[in-house]
Amino acid sequence: MTPDMIGYLGYLAATLTTASFLPQAILTIKTKDTQSLSLTMYTLFTLGVFCWLVYGIYIANEAIIFANAITFILAASILSFKIYNVLTNKE
Amino acid sequence: MTPDMIGYLGYLAATLTTASFLPQAILTIKTKDTQSLSLTMYTLFTLGVFCWLVYGIYIANEAIIFANAITFILAASILSFKIYNVLTNKE
């Protein structure tokens, strides 16, 4: 593969994994219903995506930055709703 | 950050996102119940993780290979159960 093709593969990977997370994110942000989401899992996931983002910036990898910047915003929003719902005793 | 520390950050990211996916994977593989999983989303996700794995191999990035090799095996197992359940009209 040429370096260009490898770059495209990274963006294809980034688009696919981000797209697969979108419907869940949209549903949760719309309904603010986080009852069936695990606080532990979402905390690990959001921290993990944040680490990938910082890692991507350090190794200057555009596909990793692109995928994880979008996913981090979505995951952090969902985690905020979850924490808010837990703190206000809605769950 | 030193190159070593950046490497550790990649492994921390890989461990966190893989760990956050594990409970779902274990539950699904144990129960073989895929009723509440979306075929479209899991197909996109499994394809995406596979692309990340191939991408990681091409750019020779150990953290990307490590995270996506494990996640691919788990996601592909779940997707196989889902397809089997759909094809045998269990869903």
Image: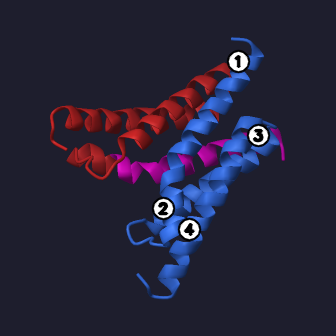
Chain colours: A blue, B red
Q: Position of residue B57 (x, y in %)?
A: 62, 22
Pinpoint the chain carrying mark 2.
A
User: Label 1 is placed on what type of residue?
Assistant: Met
Task: Mark 4 vs mark 3: tell me if same chain.
Answer: no
Q: Earlier in the sequence, mark 4 or mark 1?
A: 1
Q: Earlier in the sequence, mark 2 or mark 1?
A: 1
Pinpoint the chain carrying mark 1.
A
As rendered, which of B52 and B88 lies closer to the eye?
A: B88
On the rendered image, what quadrant is the C terminus of chain A found in? bottom left
Residue ID at (47%, 68%):
A39
Task: Mark 2 vs mark 1: tell me if same chain.
Answer: yes
As rendered, which of A81 and B69 lies closer to the eye?
A: A81
Q: Position of residue A62 (x, y in %)?
A: 77, 37
User: Label 3 is placed on what type of residue?
Assistant: Asp
Q: Residues within 10 Å of mark 1 (few under 14, many from 20)?
A: few
Q: Which mark is residue A27?
A: 2
The CA span between labels 4 and 1 is 35 Å
The CA span between labels 1 and 3 is 28 Å
* Residue at which label 3 appears: B4
The CA span between labels 3 and 2 is 39 Å
* Residue at which label 1 appears: A5
Q: Which mark is residue A79?
A: 4
Q: Earlier in the sequence, mark 2 or mark 4?
A: 2
